Image (cartoon, rainbow, N blue to C red):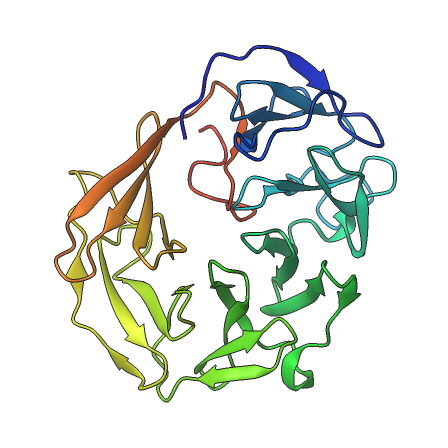
Amino acid sequence: MRLRTVLATLVLAAVALGGQPATAATPVTIAYARWTHTWELVLTDGHVVKVPEALAVAPPDAVNPGARAAFLVSGDGRRFFYFRKSDGRFAERTLHGREHVIRDLTVATTGEEWPSVSYDGGFVVTKTSAPGLGALLDLRKGRSLPLPGKTDTWNFAGFSPDGARLLMQGEDGRMTVFDRELRTRLRSKTRLWATALANDHVTAAEPVGSWPKSRTLRLVDLRTGKASRTVTVRLPRGRRIDDLDFDKAGHLVVRSKTETGVTVYRVSKTTGAVTRVRSLVRPDTKIWVLPGDDAYEPWTEKK
């Protein structure tokens, strides 16, 4: 994704963004979000959209007052999520759409509960400090789903790129693949951990070694429970695996923090050879959020 010079600044109204919507041939999406004195969205055409209604920190009556409030962008860059200044509720919207309030989540639990969203922005999962899960929300159908097995002791690992499956670890240590109705689709035969799930809903991957210095990974076949040999990712000197995932085509993708921002690499599953997909330069701003980021990434806050 290549950013052009900022052309103009738009203000996001309470109901919908003005201006001409993007055509199907040249869709405009969110390149990243940044916080200076207010939240702003920088679009792929260079325009900047202000989001003045989004909270930056938790209010004084929250569990952790002053903690940074989550602001998320879906992986496809089409939806963004924030806590509202007016009532502390979590909200979702598109660039040209109306605000949808997610009443199950409030800013009061900031620092104790962390939301994650699927690539398409249609599903939200919150992890808690308990540990365990808080909420499982299907935004397409506008409903909250009960936790599987009537227990909150699940560890959420991630979504498949198509958003159709959720990968979670149960109390017994086994990885389980759920569909969006939270029906069990596959349960691993072993207790091998994984953090990323491919679109075949069977192949998973995990970094190997002590975080955050890992430069190796392995694949896990969740159907057989078997792991591949460990593969060293051939990142440039000083780089490490900061985020591991699959793209929609099934390629392994690694994001790695650099001195100037983030570089995205496609990784060979057999040799660990990397192909640079793109590099993103960090803007001079306190907080920087990329599409697909969780509530905190190594590059989120300027150190």
Vertical relation: 265 (above or below) 214: above
Left or right, 127 with reference to 170: right
Residue at 21%, 61% (x, y): give it. 269
Residue at 64%, 86% (x, y): give it. 149
Vertical relation: 296 (above or below) 299: below
Q: Quadrant of the C terminus?
A: top left
Q: Position of residue 186 (x, y in %)?
A: 46, 83
Q: Position of residue 64 (x, y in %)?
A: 70, 47
**Quarter of the image holding residue 134?**
bottom right
Vertical relation: 211 (above or below) 93: below
Left or right, 102 with reference to 223: right
Along the line of sight, the residue nearer the viewer: 207 or 43? 43
Along the line of sight, the residue nearer the viewer: 121 or 57? 121
Residue at 34%, 25% (x, y): give it. 260
Q: Quadrant of the N terminus?
A: top left
Left or right, 98 with reference to 246: right
Left or right, 192 with reference to 75: left
